[in-house]
Image (tube, rainbow, N blue to C red):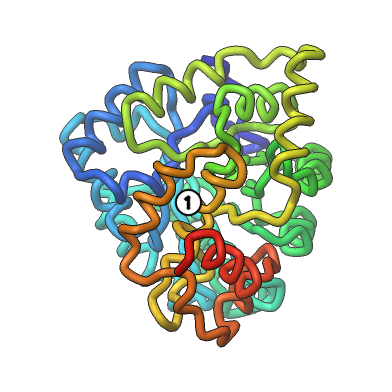
Amino acid sequence: MQYVQFGNTGLTVSRLGFGGIPIQRIDQPGTRALLDAARRAGINYIDTARGYTVSESWIGQSLEELGARDDFILATKCRALTASEMEAELQTSLANLRTQYIDLYQFHNPSLADLETILAPGGALEALQKAKAAGVVGHIGLTAHLAAVAVRAAETDAIETIMFPYNIVEQQGADIIDRCAKSGKAFIDMKPLAGGAIEDGRLALRYVLSNPGVTIAIPGMAAPEELAANVAGAADTAPLTSEEQAACQKVRDVLGTQFCRRCNYCAPCTVGIQIPSAFLFDGYISRYGLETWARERYATLPVKAGACIECGACETRCPYNLPIRQMLKKVAAHFGE
């Protein structure tokens, strides 16, 4: 495992981190086993969030049972905007994670207007700065899906880390990486596999981690096989070979830019469509030819894409401005419902 300086925080971090979203699909004993395996593989960074349902709680219980709290840089985040909201959310995170301190607390995907509220007097930044002075929070960061928000964060001295998407098919992160390098901030790469759209995880991590400006990548993982594959993919951080560069271009040719990253910010659907799942199963047909497999899984969805009433609420929440209603029509046409 390769280790680097975590921006100007003074921390040393593994270049592969543990993304804590997918553990919602398993259970707490499974989470404990994964974290134990991650520790043995040399991973020393965990990412979670208040909004990831049971993720904080299961991680906290697991670290307590393993006696491993101090073996990890523990990072979480919330969507509080005001100081009072942040104080309450921080206390909940501390209780969930069963810890006296959190190494990195982040503002979770605010809009540009929300970020200005956070930074203003009485905003959430005030609460985190007080917590940092008290030793309850080690460092302050931000996560974003929109470049304008990340750029504003890069200009803000109090924000020490920025998490932003960067992968084979999403290149706008390159500018944010440069801004982080110039300002001494750590760049945390979210969605290195483009939300699961990139099938070749080894290639995806090779691409991301061959860029020395990427401090750490945090792919989600919920199974021992996923952990092992991620560790293997992060083992080689040398420049890409010509064959790997050609393979990356092939991925771009197949995916394009108009695809679902499965961030689930479009939820909840007014009529209950599981939008990311509908797009995922459709992609297994259009991109990979796995028609029987995809149709079997699409059939398990309680509400199909054809039930869309075209209210457009999902599109107002999508950080990638996808034409979700149009895309759902295509899914319904492919599956016949």
Is residue 177 toward the left or the right of residue 276 in the image? Answer: right
Residue 295 shows up from this direction: yes
The residue that appears at 50% across and 37% down in the rendered structure is: 219
On the image, the x and y values in percent for residue 169 come to 73, 41
Is residue 336 toward the left or the right of residue 70 in the image? Answer: right
Splitting the image into 4 quarters, where does residue 190 fall?
Answer: top right
Does residue 273 sit above or below 172 in this rendering? Answer: below
Q: Nearer the viewer, residue 245 or 95?
A: 245
Q: How many marks?
A: 1
The residue that appears at 50% across and 75% down in the rendered structure is: 83
Is residue 6 toward the left or the right of residue 148 in the image? Answer: left
Q: Dot 1, crowdedness within 10 Å: few (<14), some or many (≥20)?
A: many
On the image, the x and y values in percent for residue 288 come to 57, 37
Does residue 232 sit above or below 274 in this rendering? Answer: above
The residue that appears at 31% across and 55% down in the rendered structure is: 94
The residue that appears at 48% across and 74% down in the rendered structure is: 306
Q: Nearer the viewer, residue 337 or 11?
A: 337
* Type of the residue with mark 1: Phe
On the image, the x and y values in percent for residue 92 come to 30, 64
Q: Which residue is mark 1?
A: 281
Splitting the image into 4 quarters, where does residue 271 fall?
Answer: bottom left
Secondary structure at numbered mark 1: helix
Residue 190 shows up from this direction: no
Q: Nearer the viewer, residue 24 or 5?
A: 24
